[in-house]
Image (cartoon, rainbow, N blue to C red):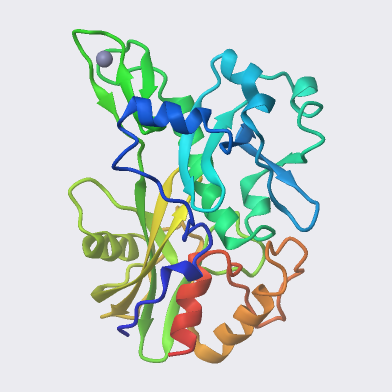
Amino acid sequence: MRNSAPFEDNVFAGSPLDRAGHVRRDAEWVKARFEDPSARFLPLWHLKTLTKEEGGAGLAWLPRGDVADDMQNGAQTVLLGLDQAHGPRFAVDVSARSPEDADPPFAAAGAFHEVRALAMRVSRADAAILAQARSMIDWHARHKFCAKCGQPTQATEGGYVRRCSAEACGAQHFPRTDPVVIMLVTKDDLCLAGRQKFFPKGMYSALAGFIEPGEAIEEAVRREVMEEAGIEVGPVYYHSSQPWPYPSSLMIGCHAEALTTEITIDGMEIEDARWFGRPLMREALALSGKDPFLNKVAGAGPDGILVPAPMAIAHQLIKAWVES
Ligand SMILES: [Zn+2]
């Protein structure tokens, strides 16, 4: 099947901010945005985001004065981008605050929540900003030292580069995005889905895996499906992609056509894989859409299954196939 989907259907995609990639190299320009009275800062504390509940859940943007102490103490900031109507937007890592200290200063604005729990409660625009903020702040926290020489690195270019402080080295390090292929393999009126041991009871999903260096998307799809389920794959069709900020993946959603049907489970990454028909998958989609996190779904009937919630690209891949 050869249909691509609007990527905005995928949660975490579709940020409204202008990332200003072409001008953020200019330190003076970034400084001016930083000092702009309309600049607002989104605090992250141990990767949890400050969220307001008033008038529906949303990001709690603070003026610079509210996080001035944190920045004085070296808190990492990242330019997220420019909001056309409201000015520059930054993320700021306030993790250096002690637990007792983390809530009270921000309590008036909201509370800190995990990004995953927030994703379906906030607007699509806010979810996309959350993904960017979480991935970027996490990257800074993990890359304080040069991977080439071991000396400390310093952030520059609005937070999109970390430069080695050793003059003789001067290596530049850039934020990573790790590509993952996720594919719904089909054969005539059947689709292949597998389950990992930690999945909720009855849950099956599209197969997935990291792309390896020197590998094309199509090759990664064929290798992963062969490794996990022993199925040979022919044509591969791109569907859509989804940023996945745990910590910084890009899910590349594909449909793929199977050339063989006999399943051989690897028993390591997945514990079961089966062929499912459209009617059963249609039921599973309806059931999985009821609870965005599936925590409270006890499980489908004896023959029924569950699939991931709509926020997962696997859900969208299955939906596109069922509706095709
Ligand atoms: Zn270095």
Up-down relation of residue 255 to residue 280 (above or below): above
Q: Let me know if residue 95 appears in the view.
A: no
Please state the total of marks drawn on the protein image. 0
On the image, the x and y values in percent for residue 237 come to 28, 75
Which residue lies at the image location 54% right of the left edge and 35% below the top edge? 91
Up-down relation of residue 321 to residue 127 (above or below): below
Up-down relation of residue 45 to residue 19 (above or below): above
Which residue lies at the image location 71% right of the left edge and 74% below the top edge? 290
Please indicate whether residue 2 sits to the left or right of residue 126 in the image.
Answer: left
* Front residue of this view, candidates 294 and 6: 6
On the image, the x and y values in percent for residue 71 come to 57, 19
Ligand 1 image position (quadrant): top left
Based on the displayed image, in which of its 4 quarters is residue 243 positioned? bottom left
On the image, the x and y values in percent for residue 122 come to 66, 57
Q: Let me know if residue 186 appears in the view.
A: yes
Please indicate whether residue 321 sits to the left or right of residue 47 in the image.
Answer: left
Which quadrant would the N terminus be assigned to in this image?
Answer: bottom left
Which residue lies at the image location 45% right of the left edge and 57% below the top edge? 267
* Front residue of this view, candidates 311 and 59: 59
